[in-house]
Image (cartoon, rainbow, N blue to C red):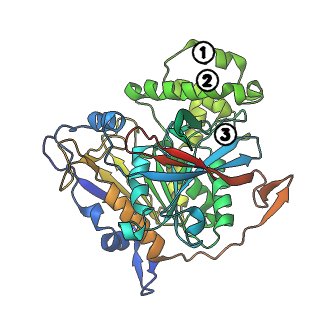
Amino acid sequence: MFWSTSTVTIHSPPVSTLVTLRDTNDEISLREFIESKCPSIFKPFRPTWWLFNGHLQTIYCAVGNFSHVGQVRYERRYLSLLDGGTLGLDFTGPHQQDEIRKDTPIVVVMHGLTGGSYEPYVRTILSITCASVENGGFGYRGVVVNFRGCKMFAYQVGTNAGITSVIGADVPATSPQLYSAGHTDDLRTALLYLSLCYPNAKLIGLAFSLGANVMTRYLGEEGQNSKLASGCVLACGSYFNRNVYSKTMGQSFRRILLKNSPGMGNLYDRLPEHEMQWVLQHERFTITELDEHVIRFIGGSSPPFPFPSAWAYKRWASSHEHVKSICVPFIAFNALDDPVVSNVPVPLPEEAKHTLIVTTDSGGHLGWFQRPARPDSLWHMEQWTCHPVCEWIKATAEDLVDPRPLRTQDTELVGGFVTSKDNPNIGYKGGISTSQITTSNEGMVGLVTSL
């Protein structure tokens, strides 16, 4: 693999759907669309020589120096949910939120298993799509949907006297439910909120790892009714069963559970107490063990939770069977040497007309690191996926006509919650901006000011 080029393959179904171009009203296939609008997909991926396999690419995601990744300033909004839970939405854009046009496209992001809006792979994309046009960006609004209980970042508080302290900013877990690869109602609630706040804005989906599985399932479940006009996912997979990383990922989730359990209300109404004792007695365990002892009980709402076993939950949570039901343009990126995600659903079935899958021989899990054309230093890396993903976002936001009929938002106010008449499990209250946070280049530490 040293100094070699990784093969890039675009997988499409036997017949791709036709899409309509906004400027000419011409109809072309989805494959032809990316050939004309997303040329970077067809450029070779050349992994840097010292990250020559999937393990090294994956490890570099955790230990690499990402100081060259631009700053992203977030404005946080909390949504209180019907089940007592809390969602944290982080907004960003080229200006203050109230200065951005209401019809500006919105990139809706979902992060990985225990990540948040601070993740370099999130900031890399948003620092381009949500920068001002004057600064070389697209001028879009971005919103990161943070999972319940996940750490968002550490930040410093600014006062008139200067920087005073460091505080941890998490999305609190305020109900006996966390999240999972298969639970889509939290994303559905966030999209309801966004579609009511910005009814004329095109919503473009972008998701990574576990969040990618959630978004793929959502798109398949909703079909023609999806509030997302397109979707792009990276390293999608629900079967995180490679033991070398599974225990590390399980340990990270264990910390989230133990930290949040005091505020999770009647936790033992959902999670049997002996299962919590098992978690307390084991500091390291695999994702499969986590699913068996925790997730199958509190990874989503009831029904369908709880599941009789981890494998019953995994079969339900997999997004693979939902791909054929997606009805908006959808693209997925996967590395075939990903040491975390175990399989890629290729070849695509005939029904998956709206889907394209891009595979590379190498790249690891959310890696794809290569040397840029003009590196700033010996260690300066860029992610090959950055340019194709940004091209896809811009093209599907600006160059396509959405042929689906416009649906009105059928909602009602129940007990102070804005609820969906179509789905009584979906509802929220809140959504008021609470603070502004800057993720900086070093350690995601920035300034917070009250609004």
Distance CA(mark 3)–CA(mark 2): 18 Å
Q: How crowded is mark 3: few (under 14 residues within 10 Å), some or many (20 or more)?
A: many
Give the residue displayed 67% in from the left and 30% down from the top: 297
- Could you say which quadrant of the image residue 96 lies in? bottom right
Labels 1, 2: front one: 2
Labels 3, 1: front one: 1
Dots 3 and 1: beta carbons under 8 Å? no
* Residue for badge 2: 258
Q: Which residue lies furthest to the right in this view?
A: 415
Q: Which amino acid does label 3 sit on?
A: Gly
- Could you say which quadrant of the image residue 146 lies in? top right
Give the residue displayed 56% in from the left and 34% down from the top: 167
Q: Where is residue 112 in the image (x, y as percent from the top left)?
A: 48, 42
Instruction: Please tell me whether mark 3 sits on a helix, a strand or a loop.
Output: loop
* Residue for badge 3: 300
Give the residue displayed 39% in from the left and 36% down from the top: 340
Which dot marks residue 280?
Answer: 1
Instruction: Please tell me whether mark 1 sits on a helix, a strand or a loop.
Output: helix
Tell me which numbered mark, 1 or 2, is placed earlier along the sequence: 2
Distance CA(mark 1)–CA(mark 2): 8 Å
Give the position of the N terminus as an image quadrant.
top left
Is 311 on the left-hand or right-hand side of 386? right
Give the residue displayed 71% in from the left and 18% down from the top: 273
Is 162 on the left-hand or right-hand side of 71? right
